[in-house]
């Protein structure tokens, strides 16, 4: 009887190797992935949807498999996974979705938050969210301004009133705003505290 290809589910195997899981544990997870007919790029499973914009696969068994997200993992994790996947002859960068994707980013250390446009591992541009007060005093209402930047940090124009306008300015500059081609995906995420990275801003009532 022929044996099954031992390189199936390379991402799941690499994830286990990265976490130093035992061979028996990894084999058990691979068997469950086979049983669920899960995509080849799953890494682990949980019991419920995370609803944070990252790719998942819900199996009839009730397991919710997390698929490998090439852009939403820390750079150290990405490098380690690439090294582990190399053992199975897999280049994760070559398998990444080549379509541009907007992802939300928050950098607490520099009070920066906004959208980052990725394509096959490269940053194409950013749209930063800036909040400024309207008028003087501690109780002054705030307004949101969106600043589009090139990948090397140069400001595009003078700012926009919406996230969509700022993203479009970046897309136009880098040449991905072709009306005949599907535009970049905007990957909204669930944030701590129940908030989401939606574009609509709740403006203060100043009437």
Image (cartoon, rainbow, N blue to C red):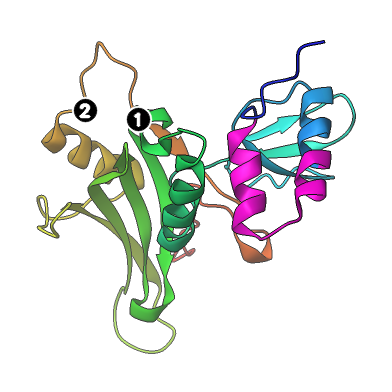
Measuring from the top left, give residue 65's x and y in whole percent: 73, 37
Crowd band around label 1 with a 10 angstrom C-alpha radius: few (<14), some (14–19), many (20+): some
* Residue 13 is a magenta residue: yes
Q: Which residue is mark 1?
A: 184
Q: Nearer the viewer, residue 7 or 61?
A: 7
Most extreme residue toward the right is 61
Residue picked out by circle 2: 176
Residue at (36% x, 51% y) in the render: 115
Does the rendering let one see residue 67? no
Residue at x 32%, y 36% (from the top left corner): 120
Residue 176 rendering spot, x and y as whole percentages: 21, 27
Quadrant of the image for the C terminus? bottom left
Per the image, is 145 magenta? no
Q: Are marks 2 and 1 in contact (CB under 8 Å)?
A: yes
The quadrant in which the N terminus is found is top right
**Magenta residues (range):** 9-28
């Amino acid at each position: 009887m022929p044996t099954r290809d031992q390189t199936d589910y390379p991402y799941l195997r690499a994830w286990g190797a990265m976490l130093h899981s035992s061979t028996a544990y990894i084999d058990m997870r691979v068997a469950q992935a086979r049983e669920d007919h899960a995509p080849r790029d799953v890494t682990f499973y949980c019991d419920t949807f995370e609803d944070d914009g990252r790719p998942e696969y819900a199996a009839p068994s009730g397991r919710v498999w997390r698929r490998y997200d090439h852009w939403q993992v820390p750079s150290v994790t990405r490098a380690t996974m690439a090294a582990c996947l190399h053992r199975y002859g897999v280049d994760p960068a070559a398998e990444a979705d080549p379509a541009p994707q907007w992802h939300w980013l928050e950098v607490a250390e520099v009070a920066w938050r906004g959208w980052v446009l990725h394509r096959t591992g490269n940053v194409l541009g950013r749209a930063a969210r800036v909040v400024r007060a309207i008028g003087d005093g501690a109780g002054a209402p705030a307004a949101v301004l969106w600043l589009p930047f090139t990948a090397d940090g140069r400001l595009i124009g003078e700012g926009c009133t919406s996230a969509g306008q700022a993203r479009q300015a970046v897309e136009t500059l880098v040449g991905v705003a072709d009306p005949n081609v599907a535009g970049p995906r905007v990957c909204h995420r669930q944030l701590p505290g129940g908030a989401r990275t939606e574009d609509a801003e709740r403006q203060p009532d100043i009437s």
